[in-house]
Image (cartoon, rainbow, N blue to C red):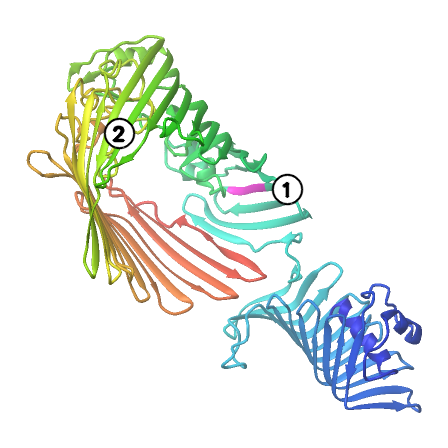
């Protein structure tokens, strides 16, 4: 019952004094009836139509009867009869009353009786449908003070009535003895209310209050949440939201855990024209740390807390500045208590500046990795204290818009400055002092790399594509190792054999490459298919990489090396700048792609790499053994191949593998398939990796992962997934869940189970979430039901 409706009804009464057709300006209405129209649209006109217009001088009433229709300032009213009593200044609309307001809200009633300024009134059999599809209904309603509307024996829901069965109860509704809609404070208060689900009452609340459906942001309590974990007990969370302004707000949440006490959280958010930021704080004084396992971080801490902030701002369309930082009293607080936005096992704190313009890229950032784990730093398997500070990392790439000597020229610059408090590595035996792998050095390392690459493609009349490639690179490396690193490097052993070391404070190295690539795509076509075969070969001539047989240069960013079909034709197959490829190498393979009239497509690649001259960099060890088991450490590499098939009806299959160059035994493979059968979508993945003792994997690894999702109907769906370790015959993880969702209600339930391959320890978690449109969300955080069996 808005102010616009009040003006519409008041104007309706005065309109009956005049004519069936258009009236003059709204200001003229004020002169005839005394209605306050100061906030009516200037120049608004009203159209009234009715079968009869009746003047009763004895009763001093004016009546419009029979198919009354009124249009005014975008609002409309339809009724069987409209009566204006000039003595009481009241307007009464009776019989199938329907009002559609300018903003789209719809009001239905048997009778509306209001004063002509619509400050006070009474309505029988009222039903309101708002523009955002929320619904009010009541036996009667009263309006007072121009702002307060009280619904007697009212019903509220955000679920649209069933078209086939209008009398069917909605999925959820709130019935109350009184529903009080305050137009000034923009709140809806329910008194003596009960919540019904599919027509069945499931909860009773003496009173509660929510924001007006038209309000998007309003201060007040949000829907509570629940959680459970064995060491913390049951947790009940009550959030309160402060809507200070359209651009900034604050959410304060109090959570009480039956075993650990009160956890307080607060999050401040602010938005600007060019970006936004948030600040979150949280803290707890644990009442019962002994509930956690012995020799863990959670047990050793009492007062725990965190401060975190995230932000991103666009300086201009090309430049972006941002941050994501976390500081906490111990390394596992945010993960233990599930602080939203900061609970990942690996939390990356960073400060960055990026720029992107066409094909040119700039990225400057400083960051630090926090491993949130429950292991004390004094334990041998602790990882957090071995994580580096990167201050800074810098990447710049520039490609001129104009061709250079008819080809494409690209410049790349990378700067990396890393500091680590503790050495990260594996010893040949406990406390032996002899390392067989050093993942990260203790101390400071810095490197600056600059490289340029030029390439140009020439196409012959027969379709042969020849591309010469020239590349030059230079590195300046500075090290300031701690004594632990110096001792670890000089005592480094590989298979009980000492490896040469060269520890110094500075290194300079260069690399120049001349390459040639040739490929010849050949097209074969039939009436129902087309096929493209593309033989391809590359050769790169380079000197040997400096210091590649020494251990002084650390390897921080090139530790991961996977040789497969996707990297066969890479000029440098190392994954980062710390290692460079030297010597002369050739890559040879053949590509295939096919498309068929029925919509099926296929693709494939098979090839091999050959080290022709110089020292093979993949056979030279470093502190992390990059290159070992890669399939490139021999002069003739393993074979690599892949094949993919896809259909128009949702079926897809891909397979990639690496085969021994002599025996053709499989050393590594990855199989993936996905299919859609009606409402069922499935995927299956199998991975196999041969044993890699130098990496700590003494046995082969085989794993199968399956996922299935099914939509039972328009609203119901379910999913299941599982991961099975073939070698240990262990179902290491499985998840199940289902959900229901429609325009007003969402419900989901999940169950997860995981099992440790080695200890066979089992953990389980359960969670559910209920979302009621316009009311809020309620649910549990996934918590452990059992820590071990």
Q: Nearer the viewer, residue 94 or 155?
A: 94
Q: Secondary structure at mark 1?
A: loop
The CA distance from mark 1 to mark 2 is: 43 Å
Q: Nearer the viewer, mark 1 or mark 2?
A: 2
Q: Is residue 431 magenta?
A: no
Rendered location of residue 434, percent (x, y): 23, 15
Task: Identify the residue at the far front of this view.
Answer: 461
Q: Which residues are magenta?
A: 261-266
Q: Secondary structure at mark 2?
A: loop
Residue tagged by mark 1?
A: 273
Q: Is residue 263 magenta?
A: yes
* Magenta stretch, overall SS: strand
Mark 1 and mark 2 residues within 8 Å of each other at the beta carbon: no
Rendered location of residue 454, percent (x, y): 34, 26
Task: Identify the residue at the far left of this view.
Answer: 663
Among the 4 quarters of the image, the one containing residue 335: top left
Q: Nearer the viewer, residue 114 or 460?
A: 460
| Disc 1 crowd, CA 10 A, few/some/many (<14, 14-19, 20+) | few
Rendered location of residue 173, percent (x, y): 56, 70
Residue tagged by mark 2?
A: 573
Sequence-wise, the earlier of marks 1 and 2 is 1
């Amino acid at each position: 019952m808005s102010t616009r409706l009040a003006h519409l009804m008041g104007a309706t009464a005065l309109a009956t004094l005049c004519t069936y057709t258009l009236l003059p300006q709204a200001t003229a209405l004020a002169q005839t009836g005394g209605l306050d129209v100061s906030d009516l649209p200037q120049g608004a006109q009203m159209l009234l139509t009715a079968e009869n217009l009746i003047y009763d001088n004895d009763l001093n009433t004016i009546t419009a009867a029979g198919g009354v229709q009124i249009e005014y300032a975008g609002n409309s009213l339809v009724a069987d009869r409209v009566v204006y009593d000039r003595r009481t200044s009241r307007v009464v609309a009776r019989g199938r009353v329907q009002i559609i307001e300018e903003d789209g809200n719809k009001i239905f009633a048997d009778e509306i009786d209001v004063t002509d300024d619509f400050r006070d009134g009474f309505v029988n059999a009222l039903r309101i449908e708002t523009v955002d599809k929320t619904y009010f209904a009541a036996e009667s309603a009263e309006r007072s003070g121009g702002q307060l509307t009280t619904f007697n024996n009212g019903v509220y829901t955000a679920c649209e009535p069933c078209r086939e069965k209008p009398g069917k109860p909605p999925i959820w509704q709130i019935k109350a003895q009184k529903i009080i809609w305050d137009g000034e404070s923009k709140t809806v208060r329910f008194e003596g209310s009960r919540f019904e689900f599919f027509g069945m009452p499931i909860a009773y609340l003496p009173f509660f209050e929510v924001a007006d459906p038209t309000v998007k942001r309003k201060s007040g309590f949000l829907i509570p949440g629940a959680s459970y974990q064995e060491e913390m007990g049951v947790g009940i969370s009550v959030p309160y939201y402060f809507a200070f302004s359209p651009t900034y707000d604050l959410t304060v949440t109090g959570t009480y855990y039956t075993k650990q006490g009160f956890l307080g959280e607060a999050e401040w958010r602010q938005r600007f024209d060019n970006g936004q930021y948030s600040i979150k704080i949280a803290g707890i004084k644990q009442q019962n740390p002994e509930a956690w396992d012995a020799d863990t971080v959670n047990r050793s801490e009492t007062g725990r807390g965190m401060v975190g902030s995230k932000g991103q701002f666009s300086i201009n369309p090309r430049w972006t500045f941002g941050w994501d930082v976390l500081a906490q009293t111990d390394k596992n607080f945010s993960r233990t208590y599930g602080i939203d936005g900061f609970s990942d096992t690996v939390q990356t704190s960073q400060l960055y500046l990026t720029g992107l313009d066409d094909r040119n890229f700039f990225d400057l950032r400083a960051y630090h990795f926090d491993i949130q784990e429950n292991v004390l730093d004094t334990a041998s398997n602790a990882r957090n204290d071995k994580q580096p500070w990167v201050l800074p990392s810098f990447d710049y790439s520039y490609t001129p818009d104009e061709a250079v000597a008819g080809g494409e020229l690209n410049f790349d610059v990378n700067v990396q400055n890393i500091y680590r408090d503790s050495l990260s590595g594996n010893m040949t035996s406990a406390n032996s002092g002899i390392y067989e792998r050093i993942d990260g050095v203790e101390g400071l390392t810095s490197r600056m790399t600059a490289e340029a690459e030029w390439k140009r493609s020439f196409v012959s009349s027969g379709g042969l594509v020849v591309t010469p490639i020239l590349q030059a690179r230079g590195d300046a490396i500075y090290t300031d190792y701690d004594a632990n690193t110096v001792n670890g490097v000089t005592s480094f052993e590989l298979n009980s054999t000492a490896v040469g070391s060269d520890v110094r404070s500075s290194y300079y190295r260069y690399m120049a490459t001349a390459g040639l690539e040739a490929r010849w795509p050949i097209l074969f076509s039939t009436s129902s298919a087309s096929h493209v075969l593309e033989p391809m070969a590359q050769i790169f001539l380079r000197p040997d990489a400096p210091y590649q047989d020494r251990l002084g240069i650390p390897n921080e960013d090139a530790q991961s090396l996977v040789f497969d079909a996707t990297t066969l034709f890479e000029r440098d197959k190392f994954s980062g700048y710390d290692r460079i490829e030297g010597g002369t190498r050739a890559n040879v393979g053949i590509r295939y792609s096919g498309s068929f009239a029925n919509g099926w497509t296929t693709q494939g690649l098979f090839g091999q790499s050959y080290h022709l001259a110089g020292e093979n960099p993949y056979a030279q060890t470093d502190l992390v053994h990059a290159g070992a088991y890669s399939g490139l450490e021999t002069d003739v590499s393993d074979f690599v191949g892949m094949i993919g098939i896809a259909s128009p009806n949702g079926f897809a299959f891909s397979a990639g593998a690496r085969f021994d160059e002599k025996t053709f035994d499989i050393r590594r493979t990855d199989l993936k398939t996905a299919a859609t059968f009606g409402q069922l979508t499935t995927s299956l993945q199998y991975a196999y990796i041969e044993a890699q003792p130098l990496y700590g994997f003494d046995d082969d690894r085989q794993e199968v992962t399956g996922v299935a999702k099914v939509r039972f109907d328009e609203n119901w769906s379910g999913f299941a997934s599982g991961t099975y370790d073939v070698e240990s015959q262990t179902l290491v993880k499985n998840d199940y869940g289902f959900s229901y969702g429609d325009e007003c209600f969402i419900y989901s339930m999940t169950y997860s189970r995981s099992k440790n391959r080695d200890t066979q320890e089992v953990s389980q978690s359960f969670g559910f979430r209920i979302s009621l449109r316009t009311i809020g969300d309620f649910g549990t955080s996934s918590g452990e039901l059992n820590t071990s069996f």
